[in-house]
Amino acid sequence: MEGSKESGAVRAAGVKGDRSYMAKRVYQLWKGSNRFILGGRLIFGPDAKSLIITLALIVVPVVIFCVFVAWHLRHEFSLHDAGYSVMAVAICFTIYVLVLLFLTSARDPGIIPRNLHPPEEVLRYDPSASVEIGGRQTPSLQFPRMKDVMVNGVIVRVKYCDTCMLYRPPRCSHCSICNNCVERFDHHCPWVGQCIGLRNYRFFFMFVSSSALLCIYVFTMSAYYIKVLMRENKGTVWKAMKDSPASAALMAYCFISLWFVGGLTTFHLYLIGINQTTYENFRNRADNRFNAYSRGCISNFLEVFCTEVKPSKNNFRAFVQEGIQKSVLHSERGGDSEDVSDNPRSKVQDDLDIGEDLLKISQRRNVDLEEDLAGRGSNGRSLAAEEVDSAISSGHRAPTIRSENRHAGSVRSGSWEIASDVLANSTGTDSRN
C-alpha cells in the first residue's frame, strides 16, 4: 500500500537545496495521516490494515456456510434444484456487503482542505493577553477561538482548528487519528479503517445493516439444516449439531455478531431519526445541548438516503503549485536544518500551535520596542512604540502579518511572513542604537 504521510512524501521527492522541484500531486504532499493507493484514486485511514480482519470476519463464515451447509441443502426443496438459490443468495449478498465496505472505507469521508496560513481577517491585538517584557505590558496577537453562526434559527458556536488553520463549519470535527477536519463527523471506525462523515455515512449505515441481515440469513439457514438432520436421523437437536458442527458454530457466531451489528444498526436508526451524529449524541448528552439540525423524522431520513452525495472538496490527483510545494517542503525540512525522518508523525511547521507562533512574532516586535526605549532614555518614546499604542487605542489590527501569496517582498519565518514595514522599524531601531 502506497503511504502518503508527509515525511515519506518529502523523502520520496529527492529534492535538495535549490534544485528544480519535481511536479507532485496533492496526495503525495498530503499532511493528514491517510494512505493512498492507485495514484491517489483511493484514500484510506492510517489503520487501513484493520480491513483485513473485517474481510476475514465476513468472508470466512460465508465460505464455511456454502461448503458445509448450503451445499447439503441444494436438494431439500420441492422445486428441482431450487436449493442452489440458498448458496447463490449467500454469495450475492456477501458481494453486496463487501461493495458497501469498499465504498465506506476507500473514499473521501468529507475532508475539509486545510489553509496554508491562518485567516488574516480575524487577527487582532488583544490587550487582555499581554506579555510583560522589561517591566512593560505589551499586547499579543490573538485569534478568537470561537465564532457564533446561525443554524435553523439557533446560534451554534464553531471552533478554530489550529492544525487546519480554519474555523470548522457546523457539525465538523477534527479526527485525531486521520488528522483531518471532517464534515458532519460521526466517528472514526477502526473496523473500516476510515472516518465516517458526510460523504460516506450512508454507505456505512447500509454496510452495518446489510451485515446484520447477512447474519440473520446464515443463522436461519443453518438452523434449518439442523432441523433437516433431525428429521432424517430422527434424533435430538444435540445429535444433529454433533453431525454438523459447522452449523452449530455458524449459529453461535451469527448470534454473537448480531448483537454487535444489530445493535449498531438500531442505534444509527435512532440517530438518523433525530438527525444527530454519534459525536453529537455523546457531546450533547453530556452538555445537555439543543439539537438544531432536526427537521422531522421523515425529512431526516430523506436527508441521509435521498440526497445526492456531495463531491469531494479535494482533488488528490491534482498537481501542486510550485510555490506551495516549496513551502511545504521547506516547512517539513525545517529550513534545511532539521530532519523530520526521526519522527514521521510529527506535524509540519505550518501546523504549529497558532498561539505560540503569534506570541513569538509579538515578542520579536516587543523586544525591538524595548531596545528603542532603552536607547532614547526612560522619557523618550520611539515612533514604533507610538504606532503600537495608537493601534491599541484605535482598535485596528496591526498590519504586521501577511500571507506569502499577497506580499512577495516579505521575509519568511517558518509558515509566517513578517511584512516589510516591521523590518523597517526594526532596522531603524538598530541603527539608532
Image: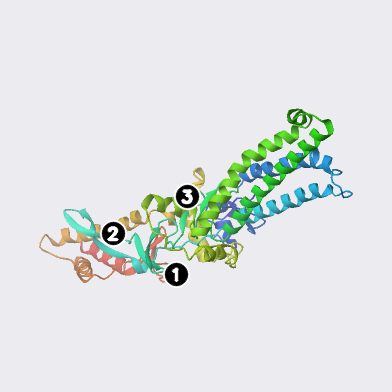
Q: Earlier in the sequence, mark 3 or mark 1?
A: 3
- Answer few, some or many: residues within 10 Å of disc 3's Cα (few below 14, many 20 plus, some between 14 and 19): few
Q: Quadrant of residue 413?
A: bottom left
Q: Is 293 in front, or is 229?
A: 229
Between the C-alphas of marks 3 and 2, the distance is: 29 Å
Q: Which residue is mark 3?
A: 176
Q: Quadrant of residue 403?
A: bottom left
Numbered disc 3: secondary structure: loop
Q: Is residue 68 left or right of residue 395?
A: right
Mark yes or no: residue 46 visible: no
Q: Which residue type carries mark 1? A: Asn
Kindly identify the residue that appears in the image at 68 percent across and 44 percent down: 58
- Answer few, some or many: residues within 10 Å of disc 2's Cα (few below 14, many 20 plus, some between 14 and 19): many
Numbered disc 2: secondary structure: helix
Placement of the C terminus among the 4 image quadrants: bottom left
Mark yes or no: residue 29 visible: yes
- Answer few, some or many: residues within 10 Å of disc 1's Cα (few below 14, many 20 plus, some between 14 and 19): few
Where does residue 410 sit, x and y in percent of width and height? 38, 67
Where does residue 273 sit, x and y in percent of width and height? 52, 59
Q: Which residue is mark 2?
A: 362
